[in-house]
């Protein structure tokens, strides 16, 4: 009987050791080690899910988000093939979706903002600036491109903010490209050409202040080129800002935010 008892004791010990081997412990971790081994979301399935939310959105890419338990789905408007890309988040249950910001608590970094900037970068060097208006020090280290419309109220707000940037920092300057959105502002093309024929920042200020401008004194083909370039970048509105690293921001922003992005 004693031999039988010893045999079963050894057998039990062996079973316990086998159960708790490092290999089995790792195998029990499952999705803690690699969520993609258990959870799948193909682009086609993501497209069907997004279609239920908004049939006008096209899915560009699908990947795991920086936060476990969520998929990152990159979408853009079907009506604007060169338009801005936006991130949606879908949970692993595939029953909940949201648009928002993922913030890394330890560093306070906005992970969504960072990803959006990467997705919407453009080729800064491909934008012609030879005929642009120039605001700031010619020797400035950082030169930012701004697309603006003389009849756009948000462009006036941005113009006031970039003047604040110039006042604070001599190492930052701006190339200003006139991009009239004639569907919204029928007179903006003529005003843009008047400004560019005179190559005058003062006339641009006058336009923003709703003062009368002289008639264009030339063809100002650079304005037509600006329109072509802006449309090629997928810009359907103004203002728009292109930073030296290619980050494209649509819309106005305060001077402090411009400085933050440049220093970042």
Image (tube, helix red, strand yellow):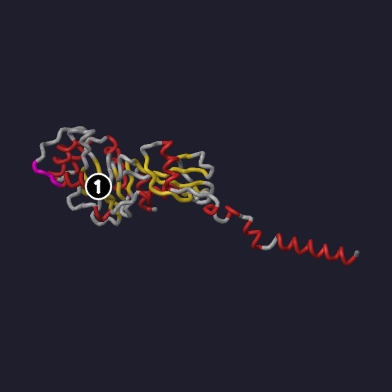
256 part of magenta stretch: no
Q: Main secondary structure of the magenta part?
A: loop
Residue drawn at x 25%, y 57% as measured from the top left:
139
Can residue 16 be seen? yes
Q: Position of residue 222 (x, y in %)?
A: 16, 47
Quadrant of the rendered structure where residue 52 is? Answer: top left
Quadrant of the rendered structure where residue 240 is? Answer: top left
* Extreme residue in the left direction: 217
Can residue 163 be seen? no
218 part of magenta stretch: yes
* Extreme residue in the bottom direction: 3
Q: Is residue 259 left or right of residue 228?
A: right
Asked whether 35 or 248 is in front, the reply is: 35
Asked whether 114 or 201 is in front, the reply is: 114
Pointer 1 residue: 232
Residue drawn at x 79%, y 63% as measured from the top left:
11
Q: Is residue 198 left or right of residue 127?
A: left
Q: Residues within 10 Å of mark 1 (few under 14, many from 20)?
A: few
Q: Position of residue 155 (x, y in %)?
A: 27, 39
Q: Position of residue 231 (x, y in %)?
A: 24, 44
* Extreme residue in the right direction: 1
Asked whether 213 or 130 is in front, the reply is: 130
Residue drawn at x 22%, y 42% as measured from the top left:
179
- Quadrant for the N terminus in the image: bottom right
Q: Which residues are magenta?
A: 217-221
Per the image, label 1 sits on a secondary structure element best described as: helix
Q: Position of residue 47 (x, y in %)?
A: 41, 43
């Amino acid at each position: 009987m004693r031999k039988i008892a010893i045999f079963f004791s050894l057998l039990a010990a062996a079973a316990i050791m086998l159960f708790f081997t490092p290999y089995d412990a790792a195998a029990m971790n499952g999705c803690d080690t690699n969520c993609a081994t258990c959870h799948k979301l193909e682009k086609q399935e993501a497209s069907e899910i997004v279609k239920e939310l908004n049939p006008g959105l096209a899915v560009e890419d699908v990947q795991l988000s920086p936060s476990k338990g969520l998929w990152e789905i990159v979408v853009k408007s079907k009506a604007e093939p060169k338009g801005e890309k936006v991130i949606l988040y879908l949970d692993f249950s595939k029953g909940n979706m949201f648009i928002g910001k993922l913030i890394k608590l330890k560093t306070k970094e906005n992970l969504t903002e960072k990803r959006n900037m990467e997705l919407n970068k453009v080729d800064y060097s491909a934008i012609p600036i030879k005929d642009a208006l120039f605001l700031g020090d010619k020797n400035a280290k950082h030169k930012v491109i701004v697309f603006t419309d003389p009849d756009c109220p948000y462009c006036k707000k941005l113009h006031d903010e970039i003047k604040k940037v110039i006042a604070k920092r001599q190492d930052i300057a701006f190339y200003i490209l006139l991009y009239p959105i004639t569907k919204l502002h029928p007179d903006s093309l003529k005003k843009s050409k008047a400004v560019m024929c005179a190559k005058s920042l003062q006339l641009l200020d006058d336009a923003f202040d709703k003062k009368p401008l002289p008639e264009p004194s030339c063809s100002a083909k650079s304005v037509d080129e600006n329109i072509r370039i802006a449309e090629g970048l997928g810009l359907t509105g103004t203002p728009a800002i292109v930073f030296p690293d290619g980050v494209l921001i649509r819309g106005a922003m305060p001077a402090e935010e411009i400085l933050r992005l440049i220093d970042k």
